[in-house]
Each structure stands twice: as structure tokens, then as C-alpha cells.
Amino acid sequence: MVDGVSVPKNIVLIGFMGCGKSTVGRELQQRLGYPLVDMDSLIEQRTGKSIATLFSELGESGFRDLETQLLEELYAPEAPRRIISTGGGVIVRPQNRTLLRQLGYVVWLQAPVGTILDRTSRNRDRPLLHTDDPRARIEALLTERTPWYRETAHLALDTRGLDSGEISTGILESARYFFTGHA
């Protein structure tokens, strides 16, 4: 129980693109045995289209509609415990921020701009970074989104210098306290 409300025991990973959500999600899945829902991958699988194509065809708002629909589906009362790895911009919508907190323990993975740039520069499927100055775009998006990440997360975790195993250990220890009401 958190604030008098029963919270599903999911672990939800949020953070900017390139912060390690998918990698840490896979590590947590191995450790807990919970199913992993990688929201971007599931949306691609269901639509048969890449995120870049969806952004191109639907615009950012249309893509965010798909994210919101998926979050509502994941919140179903009969759903099993899961690890949920979100897309970097899922927190843009207030409705999504509320849904994320209702889904379980929300962990905001953070990384420095240089790390994000290094990790995302190798991937051409980042539609928001198709620009002449990706560093400036990352900085602008982080400035815009940081208050929303902060509002949504139960835990903010700087991943700098940590491997996915160390990050997962920290998340599991914090989640245990959260779910047992000691947070």
C-alpha cells in the first residue's frame, strides 16, 4: 500500500533514450523471472512498423496515443507482475505519468548527455535526434523532460560508472523497501 492505495508490484523503468532501460530491464527479468515488457518493442511488434516510421506517419502525438493505450492495457487488474521498460518520451503526457505511478515502482535511469549521445549516435531509429545538432537536441529535451521524470519517479538513479548488474541490485533493494511499506 502506498498512500492508502494498493500498487501492483511491477518495476517500471523510465528515462531518456540511451539511459539503459532495455538493458537493465533484461537484467531485472533474469533476476526476478518476471516477464519484460519493452514498450517500444511491443508497439513495433504490434504495428509491424519501426518507431521512426510511426513518428513519420502518425506524428509524435499519434505515437504518444499508442503509448497511452498500452499503459492502460498494462494497468489491467489481472495482469501479472512485470518489468516495464518505457520509451524515453512516455512521461510527456500527464495521463501517462499518472498511469506509470499506478503501475508500480517507477525508477528513473539517468545518464550524462555525453553518454546518451554516444549510445544514441549508433542508432538511426531515434526520430527525435534526426537533426544537425543532436547534442543540443538532447540537452533541450532533457531540460524539458527532467521535471516530468522527477514527478513520476519513486527513485532517481544515476547510472554513470555502473554496469547493469549493479544498477539492478540497487533497484531490487529499493523496490523491496517500497513494496513492503518501508519507503
Image: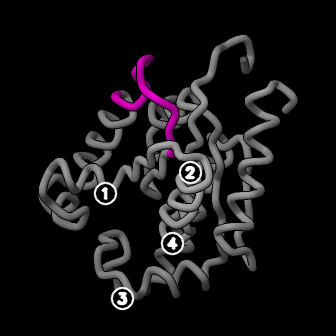
**Quick one: label 2 or label 3, which is nearer the N terminus?**
2
- Residues under labels 1 and 3: Cα distance? 27 Å
- Residues under labels 2 and 3: Cα distance? 29 Å
Looking at the rendered structure, the kind of residue marked 4 is: Gly
**Mark 3, residue position:** 132
Cβ–Cβ under 8 Å for marks 2 and 4 = no
**Quick one: label 2 or label 4, which is nearer the N terminus?**
2
**Mark 2, residue position:** 13
For disc 1, the neighbor class at 10 Å (few under 14, some 14 to 19, many from 20) is some
Give the tally of numbered discs: 4
For disc 3, the neighbor class at 10 Å (few under 14, some 14 to 19, many from 20) is few
Residue 41, disc: 1
Q: Which structural element holds mark 2?
A: strand
Looking at the rendered structure, the kind of residue marked 1 is: Ser
x and y percentages locating residue 181 in the rendered image: 82, 24
Q: What residue do we see at 57% from left, 61% from top? A: 27
Looking at the rendered structure, the kind of residue marked 3 is: Asp
**Quick one: label 4 or label 1, which is nearer the N terminus?**
4
- Residues under labels 2 and 4: Cα distance? 12 Å
- Residues under labels 3 and 4: Cα distance? 19 Å
Q: Which structural element holds mark 4?
A: loop
- Residues under labels 4 and 1: Cα distance? 15 Å
- 58 horizontally vs 85: left or right: left
Q: What residue do we see at 31% from left, 79% from top? A: 130
**Mark 4, residue position:** 18
What range is drawn magenta here?
A: 73-83
- Residues under labels 2 and 1: Cα distance? 14 Å
- 110 horizontally vs 116: left or right: right
Residue 20: image quadrant is bottom right
